[in-house]
Image: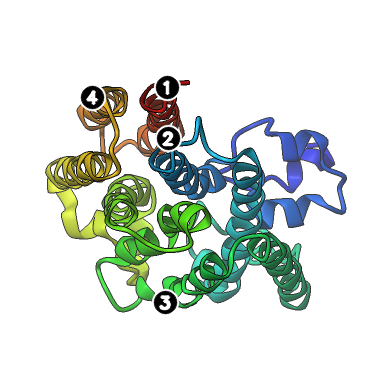
């Protein structure tokens, strides 16, 4: 087996860009930040971009500020990497006992705890540099997500609903995009955030079904274990609630029919996810989880189209 294959992470896609292109010395750190699995930062970015696009339409703009979009992109990559590094430091004992995660850089011994902590600080500094580019209200709001990030890895030890904490943290961008434009929060942003929480719980429940057997053996809790055979019903309810909240957010923000047409397409996407879900098939669960990046594009394009039409561009 070649050196390039011996340090692969078990649940990373084969022939991903990190394994193919990253220098040997940098590969464990790229894996620690999950750069070999871009779906994570994409799911963190989408609420930011949705919020920026929704706010732009409400402000009478043709579309979201491109600078804001770039900043949110960089911030999502950096902070997702920081969050994963922090989680791996906290969970190294659990990760070493789960088949899907024991090959990650920390439990496998390829990155020491000291180096991982230094890397965490560096990623946080990148995130801070991005945050400081926004207005004062958005900066303060951004710091509000820190407690959620810090407590998240511990929640699976004390509650069956760790996915809810993930939703609170991962959907925070739904507040940030609006705040970056208006310097305040209004009901559309709050409803967008609430919908994002339900969406996150839904897709991460599907993702968690990959680990449910190991989780049950070591005493880790999740909504996948809680919902069990009723997962399909729960995910449908969560997704349905998200769509309803987003529809109301759009109405309050003054959107026209384009956004709601996008919500119809998004609903069809969700129906397909639910209809093809097989909680006993880890590969299928992972595929459904990853498909949510495409879902993000549906809403984002709908919001931009809505903004262009309603503002006469």
The tag on residue 296 is: 2
Q: Would you name the residue on which mark 3 appears? A: 154
78 lies left or right of 115: left
Give residue 268's mark.
none
Q: CA distance from mark 2 to mark 4?
A: 13 Å
Q: Mark 1 or 2 closer to N-term? A: 2
In the picture shown, does residue 123 fall above or below 254?
Answer: below
| Vertical position of residue 258 compared to residue 145: above or below | above
* Mark 3 surroundings within 10 Å by alpha-carbon count, few (fewer than 14), some (14 through 19), many (20 or more): some
Pick whichever of labels 2 and 4 is earlier in the sequence.
Answer: 4
Residue 298 percent location from the top left of the image: 39, 27
Q: Residues within 10 Å of mark 1 (few under 14, many from 20)?
A: few
Evaluate if marks 3 and 1 touch, with contact meaning CB atoms under 8 Å apart. no
Q: CA distance from mark 3 to mark 2?
A: 28 Å
Residue picked out by circle 1: 312
Whichever of labels 3 and 1 marks the residue nearer the N terminus, that label is 3
Q: Which residue is mark 4?
A: 264
Residue closer to the observer: 294 or 47: 47
- The residue at the point 37 percent across, 70 percent down is 218
Secondary structure beneath disc 3? helix
Q: Which quadrant is the N terminus positioned in?
A: top right
Q: Nearer the viewer, mark 1 or mark 2?
A: 1
Residue 163 image position (x, y, % from top left): 33, 60
- Mark 2 crowdedness (10 Å alpha carbons): few <14, some 14-19, many ≥20: some
Q: Earlier in the sequence, mark 3 or mark 2?
A: 3
Q: Evaluate if marks 3 and 2 touch, with contact meaning CB atoms under 8 Å apart.
A: no
In three-dimensional space, the C-alpha distance between marks 1 and 4, rounded to whole angstroms, equals: 23 Å
Q: How is the image coloured?
A: rainbow
């Amino acid at each position: 087996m070649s050196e390039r294959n011996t340090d692969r992470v078990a649940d990373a896609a084969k022939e991903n860009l990190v394994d193919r292109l990253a220098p040997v010395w940098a590969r464990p750190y790229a894996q620690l930040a999950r750069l070999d699995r871009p779906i994570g930062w994409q799911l963190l970015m989408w609420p930011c971009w949705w919020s920026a696009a929704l706010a732009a339409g409400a402000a009478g703009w043709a579309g979201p500020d491109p600078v804001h979009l770039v900043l949110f992109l960089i911030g999502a990559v950096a902070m997702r990497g920081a969050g994963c590094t922090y989680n791996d430091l906290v969970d190294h004992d659990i990760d070493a006992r789960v088949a899907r995660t024991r090959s990650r850089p920390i439990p496998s011994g390829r990155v020491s705890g000291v180096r991982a902590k230094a890397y965490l600080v560096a990623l946080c500094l990148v995130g801070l540099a991005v945050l400081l580019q926004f207005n004062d209200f958005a900066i303060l709001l951004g710091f509000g997500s820190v407690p959620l990030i810090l407590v998240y890895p511990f929640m699976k030890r004390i509650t069956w609903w760790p996915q809810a904490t993930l939703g609170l943290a991962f959907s925070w961008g739904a507040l940030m995009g609006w705040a970056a434009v208006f310097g305040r929060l209004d009901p559309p942003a709050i409803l967008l955030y609430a919908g994002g929480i339900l969406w996150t719980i839904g897709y991460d429940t599907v993702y968690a079904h990959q680990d449910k057997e190991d989780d049950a053996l070591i005493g880790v809790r999740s909504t996948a274990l809680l919902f069990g055979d009723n997962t399909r019903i729960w995910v449908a309810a969560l997704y349905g609630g998200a769509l309803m909240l987003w529809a109301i957010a759009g109405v309050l923000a003054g959107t026209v029919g384009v956004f709601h047409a996008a919500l119809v397409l998004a609903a069809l996407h969700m129906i397909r996810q639910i209809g093809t879900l097989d909680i006993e098939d880890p590969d299928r669960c992972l595929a459904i989880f990853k498909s949510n990046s495409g879902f993000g594009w549906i809403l984002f394009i709908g919001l931009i189209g809505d903004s262009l039409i309603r503002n006469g561009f």
